[in-house]
Image (cartoon, rainbow, N blue to C red):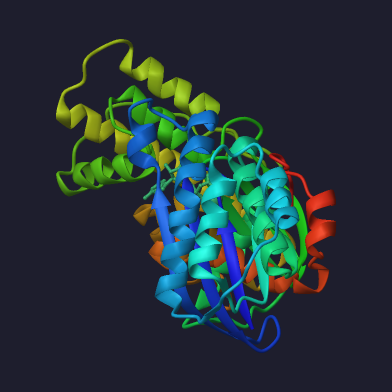
C-alpha cells in the first residue's frame, strides 16, 4: 500500500509517501518521497516559534511539499474532474487556510489523483494553529481522493522513528521504556507492548528542549538552541575549559521519575547575572548546562530501568540529536551495568520532526482509519494530546 503522511505540529512542514509491504510491525517500508521544509530561518529572528506565523508558513508551504513528495515518488496519477459541489466542499474544508483551496483545486486539475491508499496526519500534541493546517489539508485530500485518514500522535511517531532502521521496525523486547525529549515534552513512557503506553515520568515545568532553547537565548545564541548549545559545549570540552558555574541538578534525588528544568534555566540566568560573557565563558556555561541536564536525564533513565526491569530503552524527540545525550544513553548497557538492555537511538535525520515518523505511527493504527466524512466531522487538533 501507499501511505501519504503529513506533519505540521510545530515549525516543520513535512510530507512523505511511503510504500508499505506487510502488516505492522513486521512490514517493510520504502520511502518513495520525503519533502520537508524547516521554518527555522523564519522563527530565528524572534528567538522562538510563533504559532500564528508557523500557521501562515505551513499554509504557503504544504502544497509545494505535496508536489515535491509526489514528484520524488514517481507514482502515477489519474486525471480527475471536479464538479462545483466538490470544489465547494474543498473550499469549506480549507476556509481557515486562505488561498489553499484554490491552489489545491488547480493542482488537481493539472496533476491529477495519485495512487495513494490512505493518509496519516499528526493531530496532536503541538501548536494547535499549526496542527490545524495539516489536519484540514488531510481532510481536503481525503475528500478529493476518497481515501481513509488515520490520526497520529506526534510522540508515538518519535518512538517509532527511533526503532526504525534499515526500512523496518526493529523487534523490540518488552517491557520497553522510552525517554522522549523534545521542545514541548520530557517524559518517560513505559511500553508493555506495541501501542500500549503508560506515562511514568514527566517534566513539571519546562521541557528539556525548551530549556536548551531558553539558555541559548540567554547566552545570545540563535534559535533553535539545542544544536547551538551542543556545539559550544563540545568546544568547551575540547579546550578543557574550567567550569563557569556550579549548576543544580533539579529533582535528581527525588523519589520519582519526574523532571524539572525551569530552575536550571533560572540558575543559568543568575550565573550570567547581567554580565557580557567572553566566548570561553559562553562555551563553559553551555557545557555546564548540558552536563547538568544530561546528568538528570541519565539518572532518571537508570532509575526507570531498574524500577520496571526494562529490556529495551528508546530515546526519541528532537533533543535525541544531542551528541552527549546519545553517548550517555548508548552507554546504558555497557557502563551502567544493564548488559541485556537493547538501546535504540534515532538516525539523526529522524531525531527532529519529520513525516516518516508519522507514516510509521499511521501504519500502526491503520485499523482505526476513518472515512473522509468521519474524519472531517470528528477530528480536531489537540495541542495537549497525550500518548
Ligand atoms: O522533536 P522536535 O524536533 O520538535 C518538537 O516536537 O518539539 O524537538 C525540537 C527540540 C528543540 O528544543 C531543539 O532545540 C532541540 O529539539 N534540539 C536539540 C538538538 N537538536 C534539536 N537539543 C539538543 N541538541 C541538539 N543537537
Ligand atoms: Zn517532535
Residue 106 position, x and y percent, is 52, 56
Name the spot of residue 108 as percent of width and height, x first: 55, 63
Q: Residue furthest top?
A: 274
Instruction: Using the rendered image of the protein, determine whether residue 310 is visible from the camera's viewpoint.
Output: no
Task: Report the residue at 56% width, 65% height from top.
Answer: 357
Image-quadrant location for residue 129: top right
Front residue of 381 and 117:
117
Expressed as whole percent of the image width and height from the top left, the position of residue 133 reads 60, 45
Q: In which quadrant of the rendered image does the N terminus lie?
A: bottom right
Image: 115 above or below 387? below
Q: Residue at x 50, y 60 (%)?
A: 107
Identify which residue, 50 or 352, lies in the foreground. Answer: 50
Q: Nearer the viewer, residue 274 or 56?
A: 56
Q: Nearer the viewer, residue 42 or 63?
A: 63
Residue 261, image x, y percentages: 54, 32
Q: Is residue 164 above or below residue 269?
A: below
| Number of marks present in the image shown | 0
Quarter of the image where one finds residue 282: top left
Residue extending farthest to the front is: 84
Q: Specify whether 364 is left or right of 127.
A: right
Q: Is residue 79 above or below residue 345?
A: below
State which quadrant residue 225 falls in. top left
The answer to whether residue 221 is visible is yes
- Residue at position x 40%, y 52% in the image: 37
Left or right relative to 14: residue 313: right
Outermost residue toward the bottom in this view: 22
Amino acid at each position: 500500500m501507499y501511505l501519504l503522511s503529513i506533519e505540521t505540529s510545530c515549525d516543520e512542514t513535512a510530507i512523505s509517501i511511503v510504500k508499505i509491504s506487510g502488516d505492522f510491525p513486521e512490514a517493510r517500508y520504502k520511502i518513495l518521497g520525503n519533502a520537508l521544509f524547516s521554518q527555522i530561518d523564519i522563527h530565528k529572528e524572534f528567538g522562538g516559534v510563533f504559532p500564528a506565523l508557523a500557521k501562515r508558513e505551513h499554509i504557503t508551504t504544504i502544497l509545494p511539499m505535496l508536489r515535491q513528495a509526489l514528484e520524488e515518488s514517481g507514482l502515477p496519477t489519474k486525471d480527475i474532474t471536479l464538479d462545483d459541489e466538490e470544489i465547494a466542499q474543498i473550499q469549506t474544508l480549507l476556509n481557515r487556510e486562505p488561498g489553499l483551496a484554490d491552489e489545491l483545486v488547480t493542482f488537481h486539475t493539472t496533476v491529477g489523483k495519485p495512487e495513494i491508499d490512505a493518509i496519516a496526519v499528526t493531530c496532536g500534541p503541538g501548536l494547535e494553529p499549526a496542527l490545524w493546517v495539516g489536519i484540514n489539508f488531510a481532510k481536503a485530500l481525503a475528500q478529493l481522493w476518497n481515501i481513509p485518514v488515520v490520526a497520529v500522535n506526534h510522540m508515538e511517531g518519535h518512538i517509532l522513528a527511533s526503532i526504525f532502521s534499515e526500512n523496518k521496525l526493529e523487534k523490540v523486547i518488552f517491557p520497553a521504556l522510552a525517554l522522549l525529549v523534545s521542545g514541548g515534552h520530557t517524559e518517560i513512557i513505559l511500553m508493555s507492548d506495541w501501542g500500549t503506553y503508560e506515562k511514568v515520568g514527566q517534566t513539571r515545568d519546562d521541557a528539556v528542549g525548551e530549556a536548551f532553547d531558553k539558555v541559548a537565548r540567554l547566552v545570545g545564541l540563535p534559535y533553535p538552541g539545542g544544536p547551538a548549545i551542543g556545539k559550544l559545549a563540545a568546544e568547551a570540552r575540547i579546550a578543557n575549559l574550567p567550569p563557569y558555574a556550579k549548576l543544580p541538578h533539579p529533582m535528581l534525588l527525588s523519589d520519582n521519575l519526574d523532571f524539572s528544568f525551569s530552575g536550571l534555566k533560572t540558575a543559568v540566568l543568575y550565573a550570567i547575572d547581567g554580565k557580557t560573557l567572553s566566548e570561553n565563558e559562553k562555551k563553559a556555561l553551555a557545557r555546564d548546562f548540558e552536563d547538568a541536564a544530561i546528568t538528570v536525564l541519565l539518572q532518571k533513565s537508570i532509575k526507570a530501568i531498574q524500577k520496571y526491569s526494562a529490556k529495551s530503552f528508546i530515546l526519541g524527540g528532537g533533543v535525541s540529536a544531542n551528541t552527549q545525550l546519545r553517548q550517555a544513553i548508548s552507554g546504558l548497557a555497557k557502563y551502567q551495568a544493564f548488559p541485556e538492555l537493547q538501546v535504540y537511538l534515532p538516525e539523526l535525520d529522524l531525531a527532529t520532526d519529520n513525516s516518516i515518523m508519522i507514516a510509521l505511527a499511521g501504519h500502526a493504527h491503520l485499523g482505526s482509519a476513518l472515512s473522509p466524512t468521519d474524519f472531517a466531522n470528528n477530528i480536531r487538533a489537540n495541542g495537549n494530546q497525550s500518548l
